[in-house]
Image: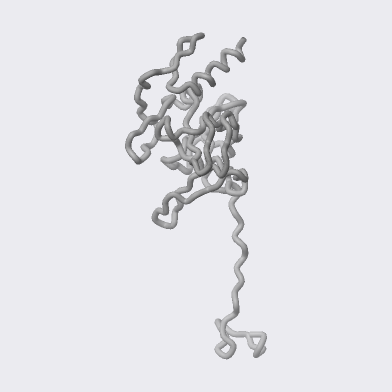
Amino acid sequence: CEDCGKSLIGECKLHGPLIRAKDRVIPSRARLTLPHYLTLRVLELRAGNQQILGVFAKKVIQKRTQFGPYVGQLSTKLTRYDESRLVLQVLKDGGKYFLDTPNEDCGNWMMFVRLARNQEEQTLVAYQHCGEVYFTTVKPIEPHTELKVWYAADYAKFMEASAVFIKEESDVCPLPPVAKEPVDPWMCSSCRSTFATFALLESHQCTHKDRV
């Protein structure tokens, strides 16, 4: 105690405890990478103070806006699995690896984007390009709307998942999901492949143009 000049174990009985100042909490790497027009919201608080987060738009985001690449650690197995997030893999040097994000300091904000349970709530499509994974908007996103993602058609084949994920129940089941056939599929005039949305068909047709 500097007031009575004594070295004490615990608090000074005469002058009382010290006033403790706490360090400022530093956000994780993933939270620091969040673009200024996006925000994180706590959707649910589970046991052990585990927060279920969602990414929401603060302003209108135009269709065909690309985000990425997704930041994660290349791994042969996942150390962190969340049934509300997409499982992502990439092809590197002939091998297939998971993009693992064991904690928020190993990834970027894209790790918080939840998967879409149906076509109506899907706002993003995930795909692989040059060994990286990107998310692109498939329609304009209005303010206060949550960003939700599902696989692009070609990437769905790579991930051995369905091109469209339709889940009627409120909970999200782990991968691989069971998809329902779309009622009125969109058909490619070049190769006769069918797609559940025009956005997926439009993305697929770009591959024909690239080949030409």
Residue 107 can be seen, yes or no? no
Which residue is at 57% across, 16% downward? Answer: 207
Left or right of residue 81, residue 31 in this image: right
Residue 41 image position (x, y, % from top left): 50, 49
Which quarter of the rendered picture does the C terminus lie within?
top right
Residue 28 can be seen, yes or no? yes
Q: Nearer the viewer, residue 94 or 149?
A: 149
Left or right of residue 107, residue 179 in this image: left
Q: Nearer the viewer, residue 49 or 199?
A: 199
Which quarter of the rendered picture does the N terminus lie within?
bottom right
| Residue lying at the far left of the rendered structure | 169
Figure colour scheme: one colour
172 lies above or below 20: above
Which residue is at 41% across, 25% downward? Answer: 162
Residue 63 image position (x, y, % from top left): 56, 30
Left or right of residue 37, residue 172 in this image: left
184 lies above or below 77: above
Q: Nearer the viewer, residue 108 or 72?
A: 108
Left or right of residue 184, residue 75 in this image: right
Residue 166 image position (x, y, % from top left): 37, 30
Which residue is at 59% across, 26% downward? Answer: 129
Residue 160 image position (x, y, % from top left): 44, 25
Which residue is at 43% across, 22% downward? Answer: 196
